[in-house]
Image: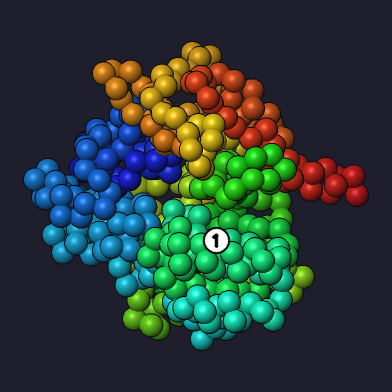
Amino acid sequence: MKVIVIGGGGREHAIIKKLKGHPEIEALYALPGNGGIASDAICVPIGAKDIPAIVAFAQEKQIDFAVVTPDDPLVLGCVDALEEAGVRCFGPRKNAAILEGSKVFAKNLMKKYGIPTAAYEVFDTAEDALRYLEDAPIPTVLKADGLALGKGVIIATTREEAKAAVHSMMEERIFGQSGARIVIEEFLEGPEVSVLAFTDGNVVKPMVSSMDHKRAHDGDEGLNTGGMGTIAPNPFYTEEVANACMERIFLPTIRAMKEEGRPFKGCLYFGLMITKDGPKVIEYNCRFGDPEAQVVLPLLESDLFTIFRAVSDGRLADVEVKFSDGAACCVVVASDGYPKQYETGFPITVDADIASDVLYAGAKDKDGVLVTGGGRVLCVVAKADTLPEAVDAAYRDVPKVHFQNAYSRSDIGKRALSILNERAAN
């Protein structure tokens, strides 16, 4: 079979690593991929949002299966276009991808079907939002309605910050048209958990839980980023919490989407907060998280391509989805200055004795040399029998990747390890 993976980041590299060498896959393409992915797949310089070109390529090469992973092409209807051209796909169609494409849609769906989430209000004008903030509880959370590269959320700890966020989102449009409409919601407290789940629109099979580290700097300081690292499993996601999530959140969400005439097939990302009142949904994503996929997929023992096809064909109930009992840690090595200003074009080298996997995100080929080409350049991913071992292994290997202005957090997994130590002490 001939397979294409749409996208060009660390998440796509993680997927490609799992598909590479599959006995049924005769050709594996990445559109557009990147300079690092090129060692594991045939990279084709077609942008992930260039749907007509993607479809034309699929027809020209007689592609059998497509894995559409980034949010933009999913929300734009890439799966719809490919399926209409006769290509089987893993990923939701456009009318289901709205679950991530519109925060307003997602919040209204949860309210309608009683899925636990933060209380909220929706605003179409800055004037109305500012009026609401005069008396709103603080801290509060402001979210752009549309896609914003995972960064369209501002947590305001003062009324002045909240008002400034309205101005920047709705008037200055720091998130573009995504901020034309905003959600202002209740500030929830508790540990955050990310759970990715395979679903064919009827059956839900959750993956191992994970913990993202969004802030740029140690101690969860600095600006929000696309993610500076992850660990799996998340120690806050106990069996009791998992059962509650399945009963109150996962299955009700899938049933709600089906009831709305928007059956969701693909990977559904549940961003959760474990509050004193139980788990609540912070956000939905319509695809694998990045960098969550980088720790979840290495722990998958079942065959990923078999799962992809079962989801596409509505046969998920018939296949096993099994994860190892081990743990994984991903440390993102970024360009210093990310997520604001940073320089690119620096050569990347990796020591020969590195034991961890290196998954490339912002890397490109320049005259046969691999150079930095983005904010998040690469991920160092280690797996082991236990989380402390996985964290230690990843950090042993971070110094073995080299490029000018390299930066990484030094505390990925620290909070999770402290919880495990507390439990061991008790």
Relative to 303, is 368 above or below?
A: above
Looking at the rendering, in which quadrant would you find the N terminus? top left
What is the total number of numbered labels drawn onto the structure image? 1
Relative to 117, is 323 above or below?
A: above
Give 339 or 314, whichever is nearer the viewer: 339
Toward the left, the furthest residue is 60
Q: Looking at the image, can residue 69 be seen? A: yes
| Residue at 28%, 49% in the rendered image | 48
Give 171 or 77, whichever is nearer the viewer: 171
Give the crowd class for mark 1: few <14, some 14-19, many >=20 residues within 10 Å: some
Q: Amino acid at mark 1?
A: Val
Q: Position of residue 344 (x, y in %)?
A: 41, 29
Q: Position of residue 52 (x, y in %)?
A: 15, 55
Toward the bottom, the furthest residue is 112
| Residue at 25%, 59% in the rendered image | 78
- Residue 16, image quadrant: top left
Whether residue 303 sits left or right of residue 216 in the image: it is left
| Residue at 15%, 50% in the rendered image | 53
Give 54 or 180, whichever is nearer the viewer: 180
Give the residue at mark 1: 153
Colouring of the image: rainbow
Give 103 or 155, whichever is nearer the viewer: 155
| Residue at 85%, 47% in the rendered image | 422
Toward the right, the furthest residue is 426
Q: Position of residue 87 (x, y in %)?
A: 18, 56
Q: Looking at the image, can residue 242 be seen? A: no
Q: Position of residue 154 (x, y in %)?
A: 58, 61
Q: Of helix, strand and loop, which one carries label 1? A: strand
- Residue 370, image quadrant: top left
